[in-house]
Amino acid sequence: DGGITQSPKYLFRKEGQNVTLSCEQNLNHDAMYWYRQDPGQGLRLIYYSQIVNDFQKGDIAEGYSVSREKKESFPLTVTSAQKNPTAFYLCASSRFGLGQILAGVNYEQYFGPGTRLTVT
Amino acid sequence: SQELEQSPQSLIVQEGKNLTINCTSSKTLYGLYWYKQKYGEGLIFLMMLQKGGEEKSHEKITAKLDEKKQQSSLHITASQPSHAGIYLCGADVDSGGGADGLTFGKGTHLIIQP
């Protein structure tokens, strides 16, 4: 079955350590996204990638890094520079990316199950 | 500033009652997406609206986008315990087709009382 996976579901780290969250999709989607969710704040965009080997900062990119070496993978590294890393992280993908804006097309984003990161 | 305002923030309704959740923007919404989330889990896509005046239904849930494409409402008829969760609206507010990521509301926490 096609879908988007994130692992692990729960992750615990000590303060000062970098940690990488995995996101894989087999939907052949061009675009992938990372969101962070905190209670009462809704989802906020961290990074997004429209195409392999290219990615853009979202609203809250500071303290995070990403790579897009393969179309199906978009790992997120939470660095020690991120001041409040404890949160729920959601990865998403959509069929079309940059330069493919077509009228009437559904740009639905498919979400993974999420990873809850706790840093102590 | 919050580009998408969702209301109410939380809602407690008795099982069997109808309810409505609203999502409002000061900008034109080029694509409006409704999601449901059980806390701490991934989002489940419910419906997507693009045209002014469009209305879609899925089981007992109906979503509408107003003619101006600045407000959407999600209506649940005869609510059931399975409807409980957090409802999020997401929208493309820059006509980029959502390619730059969607803007989300803060969510509405729905509780169904037996």
Image (tube, rainbow, N blue to C red):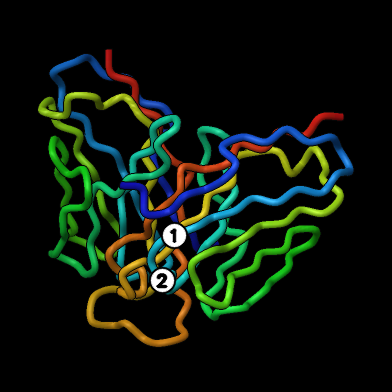
- Whole-percent x and y of residue B87? 59, 46
**Label annotation for residue A32:** none
**Residue at coordinates 37% horizontally, 60% vertically from top-left?**
B102
Label 2 neighbour load within 10 Å: few <14, some 14-19, many 20+: some
Name the image quarter holding residue A18: top left
Which residue is identified by label 1?
B25
Q: Is residue B70 left or right of residue B81?
A: left
- Whole-percent x and y of residue A113? 48, 44
Q: Is residue B53 left or right of residue B57?
A: left
Q: Do tag 2 and tag 1 residues touch (Cβ < 8 Å)? A: yes
Name above or below for residue B79 compared with residue B32. Answer: above
**Residue at coordinates 81% horizontally, 29% vertically from top-left?**
B113
Name above or below for residue B22 compared with residue A10. Answer: below
Q: Amino acid at mark 2?
A: Thr
Q: Quadrant of the C terminus of chain A?
A: top left
Q: Is residue B29 left or right of residue B87?
A: left
Q: CA distance from mark 2 to mark 1?
A: 7 Å
**Label annotation for residue B28:** 2
Q: Secondary structure at mark 1?
A: strand
- Whole-percent x and y of residue B85? 64, 38
- Kindly identify which chain the residue marked by label 1 belongs to: B
Q: Is B44 or B21 nearer to us in this picture?
A: B21
The reply to whether label 2 and label 1 mark residues of one chain is: yes
**Residue at coordinates 40% horizontally, 30% vertically from top-left?**
A116
**Residue at coordinates 19% horizontally, 67% vertically from top-left?**
A52
Q: Quadrant of the N terminus of chain A?
A: bottom right
Q: Amino acid at mark 1?
A: Ser
